[in-house]
Amino acid sequence: MSLPAPAPLRAVVVDDEAMSRARLCRLLGLETGVQVIAECADGDSAVAALRRLPADVVFLDIRLPDLNGFGVLQALSAQSRPQVVFVTAHAEHALRAFDADAVDYLLKPYSAERLGAALARVRRARAAQTERPL
């Protein structure tokens, strides 16, 4: 008897650059078991979407209009915060990203293979959360 397939990862993509957002959504669409449930172009709409939708992972740019990526995370409660993969062109924020418990840090331009590695980390982190005793 085979085990049921795991539920797809519900992803929110947050990037103020339309082309970057579209590319990431396209690459995520090529991955098995990933569903993009929202796209946001600024920090305020990202907070609203993440509060409203049960997301497993957020692919989060750092430099956003109105509220940066770190501000987005600060605006979320710990229990409603999904796994975080920062996606940015700015390498200088990597240490702060991992201090904020990011699962991964994708530096633009990233490859489909590098995105796949980030998704593997997200899935491992998700599995570890569900296996943890209460």
Image: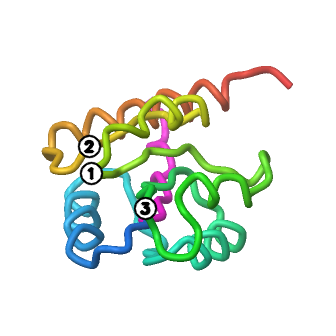
* For residue 92, above or below residue 44: above
What segment is highlighted magenta in the picture?
1-13
Q: Classify residue 132 as left or right of residue 89.
A: right
Q: Residue at x 48, y 71 (%)?
A: 37
In which image quadrant can residue 85 be found?
Answer: top left
Q: Main secondary structure of the magenta part?
A: loop
Colour scheme shown: rainbow
Along the polypeptide, which appears first: circle 1 or circle 3? 3
Q: Secondary structure under badge 3?
A: loop
* For residue 49, above or below residue 72: below
Along the polypeptide, which appears first: circle 3 or circle 2? 3
Three-letter amino acid code of the residue under disc 2 = Leu
Residue 9 magenta-highlighted: yes
What residue does disc 1 label? Answer: 89
Residue farthest along the right direction in this orientation: 134
Q: Residue at x 71, y 68 (%)?
A: 51
Tell me, for residue 107, which label it has, or none.
2
Comparing 82 with 74, the one in front is 74
Q: Residue at x 33, y 51 (%)?
A: 88
Q: In the picture, which quadrant includes the N terminus?
A: top left
* Residue 77 picture location, percent across and down: 79, 53
Comparing 26 with 65, the one in front is 65
User: CB under 8 Å between callouts 2 and 1?
Assistant: yes
What residue does disc 3 label? Answer: 63
Q: In the picture, which quadrant includes the C terminus?
A: top right
* Neighbour tally class for label 1: few under 14, some 14-19, many 20 plus, Cα within 10 Å: some
In which image quadrant can residue 29 be found?
Answer: bottom left
